[in-house]
């Protein structure tokens, strides 16, 4: 969804647990979605993408799920590690506006 | 393969001055997009260049401009700087226009502080 200046949501998980980060997107016509990870002082890092003709895609320790019915995207991180601490953004390809639109981000904190 | 390179990493400017930021995309990528990132507004799209032409523009004043060279390197310029322009400016490179649904890779950003 569009960034609208809201308070950044946070998620705290125990090291070793699985993390699930959610994102609601705005445009039912969007056909491509990306998850990014942004560590402090760095640019967003591409994690995984998914096209609208799929509902699940897996990478190394990460899985993205897409529910087009409710316009919902989630990122699952298995066996969360301290290095996973970051802000995670979802982005949708807004075909009408011809650009990527970013969600507000979720800050993931890992508890030892 | 080198990633997206942005220079400089940090800048401090005075109100009223102008600034030019540079972005070198991944080799072979022809599209460069620019974003402004602030704590309050998140990632906001500025503009996208492809084959030396601006293809899309976000909702920013005319003080924000850019260009792209034949080697796909891009620059953005902000004139008459205001305090509110303080932000992290990010560029992203992709093979084709981002609107076509393609991977976009970001640089480290340029942290601009206006005093």
Image (tube, coloured by chain):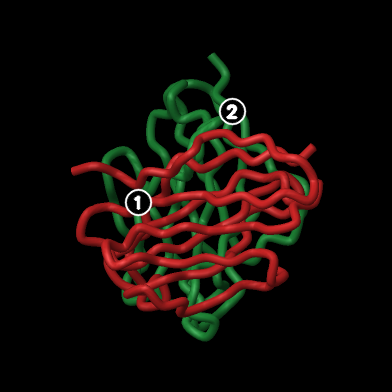
Chain colours: A green, B red
Q: Residue furthest front?
A: B17
Q: Is residue A55 left or right of residue A105?
A: left
Residue located at (46% from left, 21% from top): A82
User: Which SS class for mark 2?
Assistant: strand
Q: Is residue B4 above or below residue B68?
A: above
B2 w.r.t. A98: above or below: above
Helix, strand or loop at mark 1: strand
| Quadrant position of the N terminus of chain B in the picture | top left
Closer to us: mark 1 or mark 2? 1
User: Residue A4: x and y, percent?
Assistant: 74, 61
Does residue B72 sit above or below B100 in this rendering? above
Closer to the camera in the image, B55 or B21: B21
The residue under the point 47% across, 82% down is A95
**Residue extending furthest toward the top:** A112
Observer-nearest residue: B114 or A101?
Answer: B114
Residue B105: image location, x then y, percent? 37, 53
Tell me if mark 1 has few (under 14), some (14-19) or many (20+) residues whose alpha carbon lies within 10 angstroms of its own: many
Question: Pointer 2 indicates a residue of which chain?
Answer: A
Which chain contains the residue that carries disc 1?
B
**Near-viewer residue (B44 or B7):** B7
| Residue A70, horizontal then vertical, whole percent | 57, 73
Residue at image point 57% right, 19% down: A111
The quadrant of the rendering that contains the C terminus of chain B is top right
Mark 1 in CB contact with mark 2 (< 8 angstroms): no
Which residue sits at x=43%, y=65%? A33
Residue that mark 1 sits on: B24
> Disc 2 designates what residue?
A109
Q: Residues within 10 Å of mark 2 (few under 14, many from 20)?
A: many
Q: How many marks?
A: 2
Q: CA distance from mark 1 to mark 2?
A: 32 Å
């Amino acid at each position: 969804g569009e960034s609208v200046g809201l308070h950044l949501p946070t998620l705290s998980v125990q090291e070793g647990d699985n993390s699930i980060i959610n994102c609601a997107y705005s445009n039912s016509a969007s056909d491509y979605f990306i998850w990014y990870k942004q560590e402090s002082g760095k640019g967003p890092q591409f994690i995984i993408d998914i096209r609208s003709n799929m509902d699940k895609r897996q990478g190394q320790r990460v899985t993205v799920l897409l529910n087009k019915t409710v316009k919902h995207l989630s990122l699952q991180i298995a066996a969360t590690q301290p290095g996973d601490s970051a802000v995670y953004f979802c982005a949708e390809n807004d075909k009408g506006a011809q650009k990527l639109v970013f969600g507000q981000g979720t800050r993931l904190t890992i508890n030892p | 393969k080198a990633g997206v390179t942005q220079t400089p990493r940090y800048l401090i400017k005075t109100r009223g001055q102008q600034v030019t930021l540079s972005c070198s995309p991944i080799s072979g990528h022809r599209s460069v997009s620019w974003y402004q990132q602030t704590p309050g507004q998140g990632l906001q799209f500025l503009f996208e260049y492809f084959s030396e032409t601006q293809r899309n523009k976000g909702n920013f004043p005319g003080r924000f401009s850019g260009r792209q060279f034949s080697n796909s390197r891009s620059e953005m310029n902000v004139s008459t700087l205001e305090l509110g322009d303080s932000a992290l400016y990010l560029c992203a490179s992709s093979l084709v226009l981002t609107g076509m649904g393609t991977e976009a890779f970001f640089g480290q950003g340029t942290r601009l502080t206006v005093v």
